[in-house]
Amino acid sequence: MIELTRLNDTKFTLNADLIETVEEVPDTVITLTTGKKIFVKESRQNVKNLVVLYRQEVFHNIL
């Protein structure tokens, strides 16, 4: 799970496993595997970094 910020400044937690694509057009749009689109304040690179950190944490706990 990663914490993100909607364009209206509300924080929410997203299951990173549901992310299909992340685009900047110019706002950052996350498309989920369900087809739902979420606009966030974080940059595409920042979202990517958060997902990488989340996955490292998950795999570290498995080993």
Image (cartoon, rainbow, N blue to C red):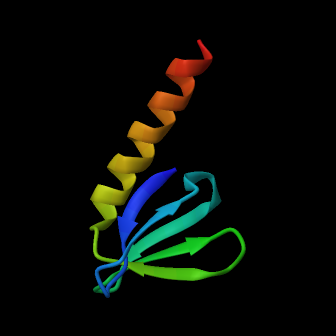
Residue extending furthest right? 34
- For residue 5, what is the image quadrant? bottom left
In the rendering, at what x and y percent does residue 7 appear?
32, 85
Q: Nearer the viewer, residue 58 or 48?
A: 58
In the rendering, at what x and y percent does residue 44 appear?
33, 65
In the rendering, at what x and y percent does residue 46 appear?
28, 57
What residue is at 53 percent from the left and 67 percent from the top?
21
Residue 50 placement, left or right of 56: left
Q: Nearer the viewer, residue 14 or 49?
A: 14
What residue is at 49 percent from the left and 80 percent from the top?
38
As displayed, is residue 50 above or below residue 3?
Answer: above
What residue is at 46 percent from the left and 29 percent from the top?
57
- For residue 39, what is the image quadrant? bottom left
- For residue 63, what is the image quadrant? top right
Residue 42 placement, left or right of 47: left
As displayed, is residue 51 above or below residue 53?
Answer: below
In the rendering, at what x and y percent does residue 54 appear?
46, 40
What residue is at 69 percent from the left and 68 percent from the top?
33
Residue 63 placement, left or right of 40: right
